[in-house]
Amino acid sequence: MPPRRQPTARQARLGAELRKLREVAGLKATEAASLLGVNSVQMSQIESGIAGVSEERLRRLAAHYACDDEALIAALVVMATERKRGWWEEYRGSLPNGFLDLAELEHHAGFRWDVDFLHIPGLLQTEDYARALFAYMNADLAKKEVDRWVEHRMRRRAIIERPEPTPYATVVHEAALRVKVGDRSQAVAQLRRVLELSDAEHVTVRVIPFDVDGFGGAGSAMIYAGGATPVLDTVVRDGPHGTVFVDAEAQLQRFRKLFRKLEAVALEPERSRAFIHRLTKEL
């Protein structure tokens, strides 16, 4: 199998996890390569996600690395052996790779957490809201390109709308609820959409009102995707030069604690629903 020109974030994560296991075992890349009967270049390609790895080779590496985390090994095997192309691959070359990587990540996630302070989280957005947002932020895009961006975002909503939906929780600041990304009717429709989705048992929406005292967390926006095992959790944040995927355990621990802290200062789900309903009358 020829090397991949550009691995997806999921393929790169598989390679990174194999590298972490090797480093914990105290082995050099050349030693791992000899275990597989490959050269150091091929081993580097496996650990960077450029080259794939078979289940047999992956399990051989895990055994030599003395990894006894069966849940992690099983999850890595799934990542290594899956061959089905996801729907997001239809957009490769026409959308930023970060969009595709996010769709792939959340498709496989065991749960999703969102925190947003300026906009309604993407999975809760209406088509009109997403269109107004993309058109404003990317004024140079042709209409058909904006249509494609919107179409991709609407298809991402499948994870909370499919027959076996992904458990989803979000903390949204009042500012995001009040900003009129489109006109008034679109803003009201967007809030009603959030209320509609929050009726589902697998969706939890909490609101942080403006009047919360001592709140300094407005820079804490994030997407947190739960992996097949906590080791494979991922945080996604928007950086100045694009989307950033965070998977270092120390950082994951920090973001888990931060999400729980934000939940604690937010209104409970029922009070949040009442709050959003009141806003629909005020807009």
Image (cartoon, helix red, strand yellow):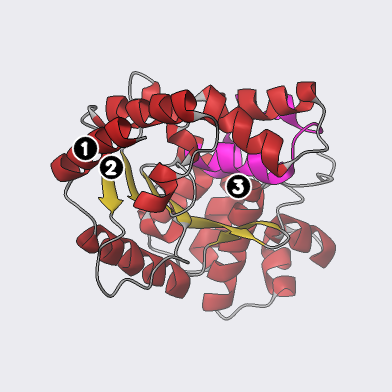
In the rendered image, the residue lying farthest to the top is: 163
Q: Residues within 10 Å of mark 1 (few under 14, many from 20)?
A: many
Asked whether the residues under the numbered discs 1 and 2 touch, taking CB atoms below 8 Å apart as contact, a structural biologist would say: yes
In the rendered image, the residue lying farthest to the bottom is: 26
In the rendered image, the residue lying farthest to the front is: 282
| Numbered disc in front, either 3 or 1 | 1
Residue 89 at x, y = what percent?
Answer: 69, 29
Mark 2 / mark 3, whichever is N-terminal: 3
Mark 3 / mark 1, whichever is N-terminal: 3
Task: Name the mark on residue 136.
Answer: none
Asked whether the residues under the numbered discs 3 and 1 touch, taking CB atoms below 8 Å apart as contact, a structural biologist would say: no
- Label 3: which residue? 10
Asked if residue 208 lies left or right of residue 87, the reply is left
For the point 82% across and 63% down, which residue is it?
39
Q: Amino acid at mark 1?
A: Arg
The answer to which quarter of the image holds residue 32 is bottom right
- Label 2: which residue? 205
Residue range of the region highlighted in magenta in the rendering: 79-106
**C-alpha separation, residue under disc 2 versus residue under disc 3:** 28 Å
Residue 248 at x, y = what percent?
Answer: 51, 69
Q: Main secondary structure of the magenta part?
A: helix
Q: Is any part of residue 51 visible from this angle?
A: yes
Give 276 or 11, whichever is nearer the viewer: 276
Residue 101 on the magenta span: yes
The quadrant of the picture occupied by the N terminus is: top right
**C-alpha separation, residue under disc 3 versus residue under disc 1:** 35 Å
**What secondary structure is marked by label 2?**
strand
